[in-house]
Image (cartoon, coloured by chain):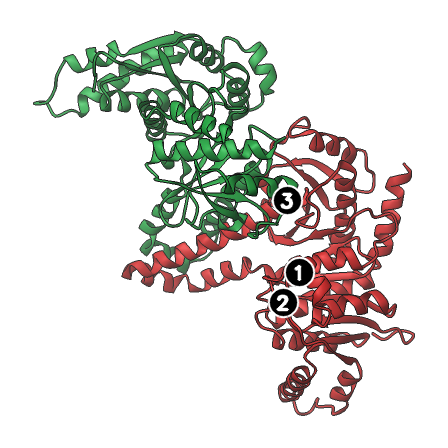
Chain colours: A green, B red
Amino acid sequence: MISGGFILKIIVDTLGGDNSPWANIEGAIIELIKHRDLSVIFTGDETQIGEVLEETFEKVMASINKYDKNPALIDNLKSRIEIVHAPDIITGNDKPTDAIRLKKDSSMMRSIKLLREDESISAMVSNGATGALVAAATLRIPRIDGVRRPAFCPILPTMKGGVIGVCDSGANVDIKADLLQQFAIMGSKYLEAAFGIESPRVGLLNIGVEEEKGDDLRREAYKLLKETPEINFVGNMEARELLSGDFDLVVCDGFSGNVLVKSVEGTALELLKKIKDDIYSKKKYQVGALFMKQMFNEEKEFLNYQRYGGSVMLGSEKVIVKGHGSSDKVAVAKCIEQAYKMVEGNLNKKIAEAVSGAQTE
Amino acid sequence: MISGGFILKIIVDTLGGDNSPWANIEGAIIELIKHRDLSVIFTGDETQIGEVLEETFEKVMASINKYDKNPALIDNLKSRIEIVHAPDIITGNDKPTDAIRLKKDSSMMRSIKLLREDESISAMVSNGATGALVAAATLRIPRIDGVRRPAFCPILPTMKGGVIGVCDSGANVDIKADLLQQFAIMGSKYLEAAFGIESPRVGLLNIGVEEEKGDDLRREAYKLLKETPEINFVGNMEARELLSGDFDLVVCDGFSGNVLVKSVEGTALELLKKIKDDIYSKKKYQVGALFMKQMFNEEKEFLNYQRYGGSVMLGSEKVIVKGHGSSDKVAVAKCIEQAYKMVEGNLNKKIAEAVSGAQTE
């Protein structure tokens, strides 16, 4: 609700995803209808955005019961939308540092610039190239006071129906124990604010569960995490336990975090693909599959990471949410919702307090 | 076949696995029947081994067609079996360094001692505690000339029906680029000798496919691997491609290798468990599953890592194969077969030659 005239402004990058700009714009409209104190700035191709918006408004009106139709709705939506023309696209093939330097007219770099320069803007949502976004956010957006390095934190579903955050997963490859401590604090505050998880159970990714396992970095981090009152540290976590549901957050260096997330993703996709191929190999399996169609659809939906929200950059002064490249409108809406909750929940202020608390101990 | 009186001697550790000593002893008998130039040394509880052997011999005789029955068979098998009494067991709860120091009467440490001291023994197969075995092999068994550090290399099945080796996966957590080069050489020679893969395609585990991705270690290793004629380097591999079948070997530091293998294992097991639970949740799924029983059994068998052989310590002067803790007799036989092939294929000599070749360039 609009309270005291406060409007929460979020940039939506409309380019770079597989279903862009449609999914991005339709997803944003879903959220604009849901939250009357939200306003969005679309970056991308101005003409294209205008056309998609027109069609989307028509769809919205057509979907509303005629007795509820309020012509003021579209005017209200329009009043909470701005468009910034930045038609260039950054792809996965662009080297991140080149993209930052050379593609200034891209929707992503223009979004980062706006986010940096306009104090009234709180957040940005994109499903464009991850590498470029992480690099640009790290280099261009100031850090929260006390945070030494921002970290990239994706979310995976667990087998008990919850989620687990992996922090860091690619932003930092060279790392020290005190950074892992900060990742644990930032990730914990994030899971509380965006997912309502109280006192998230934090694990340290390691090659064994005992305290003395791993390299010097892990042993030092273990000691530090154990003595950090701002978090609920439950010990080392082996990679095989990631989906068990026994942890809410796992902290790790960006290299092994990336390996962890991508191997889970790869294994799940390859396995489902194999099952699908095998079903087509025999008539009787196809018959059996008819009985199980609903179940397989549910499995697929369960493994659809998009449904759980995007990855976030933690430690940046502004909220940045990165959706999956193949996001549909529901996934984009979910990412905007996530950004909305992070801003509304004052996440960055909480991170600043907790980080400075841990430093003065 | 026995050629020129040459007998290949392999130690079989009969303790420490979930199905020990039965699986270990029965598995060894399968191999003794298959290879007449093989002899085994069982380490473990002498009395127990004697009892299991008697019962196993009875089973063997009962399974043979009466016209083929040759009473000399059992005598021949017995002539190729030695027993060494070492009844203590090392478990996953023992700290590896303590186990090495304190459990000298354990079957595993006695096996390592024998392997080190008896020149006539070529190999050792165990399905006991991994950490203790890796540590003992590293500390107690000399390295092949020119090899700076031994590496632990497990094997996983790929979606195209082949296998992929992961080297290193836990023996070395602090690492340099030239070690990764040695892992690539040793792993390649191993896959040729034990799996008949010609010119194995080697990938470097990294967080992106482009040459400049990753930390300094990966960038340096990429350059070095590209210029190593002893291997077939095909570039960086992202974790999600592990099971794709596009690589035969992936080289990595022991920490991320361990994360990779365990997250694949964990994801596959959790997913199959979820599917199983879901099937039991509704009557119609159970009906469908009846049609698909064979398929699910095949999936399960496909994911049964035991069927692909054990993990090996590469770079040790003696061949060491570590089977899965839950190995049955078929899995143990597979591990012994693998050790047999590695010895017969002169793997260690080939590794020594290739490693010294790479060093003099």
Image quarter of residue A32: top left
Q: In the image, is A141 to the left or to the right of B195?
A: left
Which label's residue is closer to the chain start, 1 or 3?
3
Q: Between tags 3 and 2, which lies in front?
A: 3
Instruction: Characterize the local packing of mark 1: few (<14), some (14-19) or many (20 or more) Cα atoms within 10 angstroms.
Output: many
Residue A80, placed above or below residue A194: above
Instruction: Report x, y in % for residue B47.
Output: 67, 85
Image quarter of residue B277: bottom left
The lab-note entry on whether marks 3 and 2 share a chain reads: yes
Q: Between tags 1 and 3, which lies in front?
A: 3
* Residue at point 63%, 35% (across, down): B206
- Specify the quadrant that holds the N terminus of chain A: top left
Q: Which residue is mark 3?
A: B255
Say which of B47 and B296 sits in front: B47
Say which of B32 and A19 sits in front: B32
Instruction: Report x, y in % for residue B270.
Output: 45, 53
**Which chain does tag 3 point to?**
B
Which label's residue is closer to the chain start, 3 or 2?
3
Give the structural element (helix, strand or loop) at label 1. Answer: loop
Residue B315, placed above or below residue A260: below
Q: Which mark is residue A311?
A: none
Instruction: Report x, y in % for residue B112.
Output: 77, 66
Question: From this viewpoint, which residue is outermost toward the front?
Answer: A361
Instruction: Characterize the local packing of mark 2: few (<14), some (14-19) or many (20 or more) Cα atoms within 10 angstroms.
Output: many
Q: Amino acid at mark 2?
A: Ala
Q: Which residue is mark 2?
A: B331
Q: Which residue is mark 1?
A: B310
Q: CA distance from mark 3 to mark 2?
A: 26 Å
* Residue at point 80%, 56% (across, down): B316
Q: How many marks?
A: 3
Q: Amino acid at mark 1?
A: Gly
**Which chain does tag 1 point to?**
B
